[in-house]
Amino acid sequence: MCGIYAYRGISEQSSKNAVSLVLKGLKRLDYRGYDSWGVAAMAVDESGTPLSAQHIYLEKDAGMVPEGDTVAAPKCLVAIGHTRWATHGSVTKNNAHPHLSSDATFALAQNGIVGNFAELKKELTAKGYRFTTETDTEVIVRLVEEMLKKGGALVEAVRRAFTKMEGRNTIIVLTKDGTIITARNGSPMVIGLDYGKEGREKKNPDLSMLKNIYFSSDTLSFAGAATHIVVLDNGQMAVSDGSTLEISSMKTGKKVGVKPVISTMVAEEVNKEGFDHFMVKEIHESPTTLRAVVQQNDAEFKKLVSAVKKARTVYTLGSGTAGIAAAQIAFYLRSIAQIQAIPLIGAESDSYFKLFHKDDLIIAPSQSGETADVLEVLELAQEKGVKIATLVNMQGSMMSRMADYPFMAKAGPEMCVMSTKVFVAQIAFGYYLAHAIAGNAEKGVENLRSLAKSMESFLDDSKQLDKISRVAGTLVDVQDIFLLGKSQNVSIVQEGMVKLIEGSYKHAHGIPAGDLKHYAITILEKGVPVIFAVSNDSVLGDVVNAAHEVKARGATVIGVGYCKERDGVFDTAITLPDTGDTSGIFNVVVLQLLAYYLTVKLGNNVDKPRNIAKSVTVK
């Protein structure tokens, strides 16, 4: 949630317009929240001299980060920025970050939630502090001001303030003299270092070679610009005055060494490439994702296979779409490899904490690798000696750094807030892993590559896409949509449900087909659309029977997968090639397309649905 981005030029050549660079960085981060945006900068005159010892330029507004150079900012050497997903306080210009100190000598932006903000606000109000916003962030600003009264530098005041705050928070501060201070406790913060051509391949380049410094909530935002990456750990602070970069412990104040890692993030021109939206572009990239996900480091992959085989219990863990991916991975581990695998939802895992054992293993898929409620479970499990495997799509993420077996989804940038190709990568990885554990790794690779070929042909067929679009048109005026599946398609219809809810804002309900007669059938009546995900497997007959039961009540029956309209039960069928035990993966891509076309027809914002963000770094 929320995106932080900052830039500081070091050399004269690199002292570009910092505000312009920060706005571009924020635009690449707005998947983290797009309720409001803001920039704070140290303004300078034509000679590069600060305009005033107390002058911090501030521009912010409600809504999405503006396109292009539309902000008329003065020339700036250094700037910080923020794109907001609202937690405390309504979506207004006043509540937008950054927030200025009372004397305008520093500006501060936050990613996270101050758990005890109400108590702190009450204490500070009693001391005479006035609050002009509804945010918990302003409490941090006033708390820092209070700590300054105790003497010492601003850095020390920030450190003291953090010791009084509860919750997972990361902040960034710009001072009146252009110093940047950032502190992390939970929410991500990565530092991009640009050492120029001379330092690009050096493992430990000298700080004197530094050209530019970037601070951001993820590495993608400065991909290609930074030659090296430093990931701030929880409990650490970083300070840069333009000539140095120092990292220290918030607990002790002691400095720790800066250990840059050569960046592998390639500069990619992330655009729609002729598609109308990022979502449909990314769905069309699923076949490429399938081919990439099986290209793992062989030695590291074999270590994971061995660890899974040895584990007493395997837990798969995620939240939201990644939680559904975790459930599908657990299904593959059970059905293909006969591994005892239990899926967990991050925020609902507490009943398992006492059951975790040092001989267990957790497999945690995540797009960002920074999901707060998942990280909390992993931290507790790690204390008990549980081994951790992660599958993320973001280099340098906290989850991958704490993992015993870190793997990348290799899906490439995913800009749409609704995850599509990353979900495909995650469940395909689980399928491949299950076959490898069963001693059939080559079969897993062959089946996924065959699936990629079939999927590519399907996505290139305009007639098939037109049919999905027409089916979506029949859902425009309905309020309730049901999705049913069995076995390999249970999690698939649940993910279809999530996509329909996220994009269309309609009520959708994905349930196991076998549970139909136990409760849902009471509300399936004439005109209610019911979508079945169908595969040619051992439960095909059960799924068809459920479809007949629905049809007998007058519902409109839509089939996706191994089905045809002439079968007599499906009013409409989107027929797919039979790809065996990978057909669930194929089915979910069609459900993603169905959600896409429905979202478009409803006129909703496809790539940025209301009220949600792609990276959920708060609980």
Image (cartoon, rainbow, N blue to C red):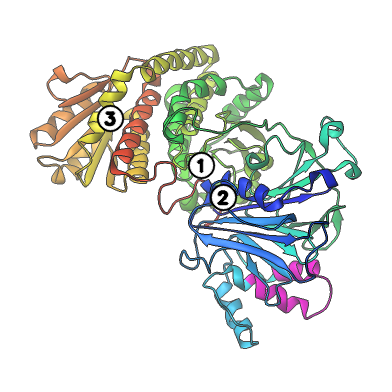
Residue 550 placement: quadrant: top left
| Mark carried by residue 501 | none
- Front disc: 1 or 3: 3
Query: Where is mark 1, residue-wise?
Result: 317
Asked whether residue 537 appears in the rendered view, the answer is: no
Q: Are marks 1 and 2 in contact (CB under 8 Å)?
A: yes
Q: Nearer the viewer, residue 283 or 432?
A: 283
- Please, what is the dominant secondary structure of the magenta stretch? helix
Left or right of residue 162: residue 152 = right
Please report whichever mark, 2 or 3, sits nearer to the chain's N-terminal start.
2
Q: Is residue 141 highlighted in magenta? A: yes
Left or right of residue 50: residue 303 = left
Residue 109: x and y in percent read 64, 62
Q: Is residue 261 above or below residue 454?
A: below
Query: Where is mark 3, residue-wise?
Result: 469
Query: Where is mark 2, residue-wise?
Result: 377
Query: What amino acid type should be assigned to the residue bearing mark 1?
Result: Leu
Residue at x 63% of width, y 39% of height: 220
Q: Residues in magenta?
A: 140-162
Bin the neighbour count of mark 3 within 10 Å (Cα to Cα): few under 14, some 14-19, many 20 and up.
Answer: some
Q: Is residue 150 highlighted in magenta? A: yes
- Front disc: 2 or 3: 3
